[in-house]
């Protein structure tokens, strides 16, 4: 059975030893730590590694072998970070420092050795004392989204450390990162709503959600969740997964018609959003009859070289009141089964261990990717740092069926505790920009872990939209 929803429904456009801190609750029922890792998760990692349990020990070995996870890493903070062509790009400095902070913080929680916490805190404090602007081409929005959610996760792991300047770090996140991501979700850089592929929206949603948690800001959390469910852009769940094949338990990932690298990026980002929401009591994993499960299964099967159905689609491109065109994807792109990202352990363990569901392709691809590494293990370029990784260590869990997410729901408790100066709207000084037609043509960096040919995308002139189901054999459309 074929179901079309969202932007592709019918003929429409695609749119020394120091004990780690105990968990604390703050804000309107929020839990800390409560992004990608809860106190239960961190305790499980430490206990399993100490006991020499597999596969945790293999996952921990990947962490300790990574050069970013070494104590004494020295931060190199910048006042302005640039990403994008035509700018003096220095964003690699930022993402390397973020991954060093995260990896050292995670290593501290597993070992209890304070030298790693001290290193993480020093990195985070150095950046919050200096960074004021993210700039560049349209790729500045990617920088805000990707590095925003990652920075927030690193900070969440040390938020109660005596030497961490949490308030200053929160202010940096609210002033520098969040305005760009919120502006992108509202205005899409002045482009038509489908100009940017799903991963652009998903980086922004991940950033807003993570900063909402970091800053005890329920309103921002709710906005991120609402966009995931109902957003008009390509990254909302029904637009990122526009077609569901119920008879196969698969959901077509829209960027499968683009290339494998970006499809993997999108699945990893959506999984990140779902995991952070789950840890705050919001079940996005199960939303719309577990639509994300079907999309992740689709990408897993396809990435392993399996045959998947594909419904051709066309999306409009261009600037609002400016140049316009369209682009059609008529088949799933070719794949390299050896290509991987550290995204699968988190997703597979949720559906099979937390929920007790069958997820054959997720189980298989997670086993192939194990033990997962992190930033620095998947190449030196930015694509190798798009996920924080180490899922074998962090997300492997015993099977315990949970029928609902474990933490307080979206409106638990009373009152709201926000970071000092936290507003619902972006700050007035945000360099969000938008509407430059020449800044829209390239809708994403080409800097990914690896590329594959045969993307199946054909550029079209005009705005004609075609949506049709292809035969599973790859024959004529029906």
Image (cartoon, grey):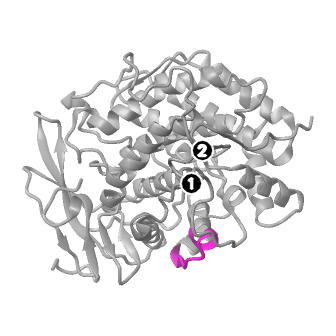
351 or 269, which lies in front? 351
> What is the residue that sits farthest to the front in this orientation?
414
The residue at the point 33 percent across, 64 percent down is 333
Between 334 and 323, the one lying in front of the other is 323
At a point 56% along the width and 21% down the height, the residue shown is 420
Location of residue 388 in the rendering, given as x and y in whole percent from the top left corner = 60, 46
Q: Position of residue 148 (x, y in %)?
A: 51, 35
Position of the C terminus, as image quadrant, is bottom left
> In the rendering, at what x and y percent does residue 190 appear?
22, 33
**Element assignment for label 1:** loop
In this view of the protein, which residue sits in the foreground, 220 or 381?
Answer: 220
- Which residue lies under the disc numbered 2? 29
Which residues are drawn in magenta? 351-361
Residue 281 is tagged as 1
Give yes or no for residue 175 being in the magenta stretch: no
Q: Is residue 267 left or right of residue 252?
A: right
Secondary structure of the residue carrying numbered label 2? loop
Contact, mark 1 vs mark 2 (Cβ under 8 Å): yes
Q: Is residue 467 left or right of residue 448?
A: left
Mark earlier in primary sequence (1, 2):
2
Image x and y of residue 119, in percent: 76, 29
């Amino acid at each position: 059975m074929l179901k079309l929803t969202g932007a592709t429904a019918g003929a429409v456009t695609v749119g020394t030893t120091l004990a780690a801190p105990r968990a604390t609750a703050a804000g309107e029922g929020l839990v800390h730590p409560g992004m990608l890792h809860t106190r239960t998760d961190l305790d499980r990692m430490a206990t399993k590694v100490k006991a020499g349990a597999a596969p945790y020990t293999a996952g921990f070995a990947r962490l300790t072998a990574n050069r970013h996870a070494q104590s004494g890493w020295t931060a190199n903070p910048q006042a302005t970070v640039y990403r994008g062509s035509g700018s003096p790009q220095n964003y690699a400095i930022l993402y390397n420092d973020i991954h060093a902070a995260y990896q050292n913080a995670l290593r501290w929680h597993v070992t209890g050795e304070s030298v790693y916490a001290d290193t993480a805190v020093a990195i985070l404090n150095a950046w919050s004392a200096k960074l004021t602007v993210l700039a560049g081409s349209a790729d500045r929005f990617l920088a805000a989204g990707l590095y925003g959610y990652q920075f927030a996760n690193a900070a969440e792991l040390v938020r109660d450390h005596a030497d961490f300047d949490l308030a200053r770090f929160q202010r940096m996140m609210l002033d520098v990162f969040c305005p760009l991501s919120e502006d992108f979700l509202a205005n899409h850089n002045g482009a038509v709503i489908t100009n940017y592929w799903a991963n652009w929206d998903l980086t922004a949603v991940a950033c807003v959600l993570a900063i909402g948690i970091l800053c005890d800001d329920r309103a921002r959390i709710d906005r991120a969740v609402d966009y995931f469910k109902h957003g008009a852009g390509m990254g909302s769940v029904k637009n990122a997964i526009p077609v569901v094949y119920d008879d196969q338990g698969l959901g077509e990932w829209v960027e499968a018609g683009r290339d494998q690298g970006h499809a993997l990026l999108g699945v990893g980002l959506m999984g990140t959003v779902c995991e952070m929401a789950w840890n705050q009591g919001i079940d996005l994993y199960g939303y719309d009859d577990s639509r994300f499960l079907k999309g992740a299964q689709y990408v897993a099967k396809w990435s392993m070289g399996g045959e998947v159905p594909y419904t051709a689609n066309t999306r409009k491109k261009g600037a609002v009141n400016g140049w316009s065109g369209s682009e059609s994807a008529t088949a799933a792109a070719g794949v390299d089964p050896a290509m991987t990202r550290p995204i699968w352990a988190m997703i597979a363990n949720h559906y099979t261990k937390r929920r007790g569901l069958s997820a054959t392709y997720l189980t298989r691809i997670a086993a192939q990717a194990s033990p997962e590494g992190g930033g620095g293990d998947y190449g030196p370029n930015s694509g190798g740092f798009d996920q924080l990784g180490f899922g074998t260590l962090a997300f492997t869990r015993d099977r315990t069926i949970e029928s609902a997410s474990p933490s307080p729901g979206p409106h638990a408790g009373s009152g709201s505790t926000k970071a000092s100066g936290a507003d619902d709207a972006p700050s007035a000084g945000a360099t969000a920009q938008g509407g430059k037609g020449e800044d829209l043509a390239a809708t994403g960096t080409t800097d990914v872990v690896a590329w594959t040919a045969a993307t199946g995308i054909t550029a079209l002139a005009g705005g004609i939209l075609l949506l049709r189901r292809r035969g599973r054999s790859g024959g004529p459309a029906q």
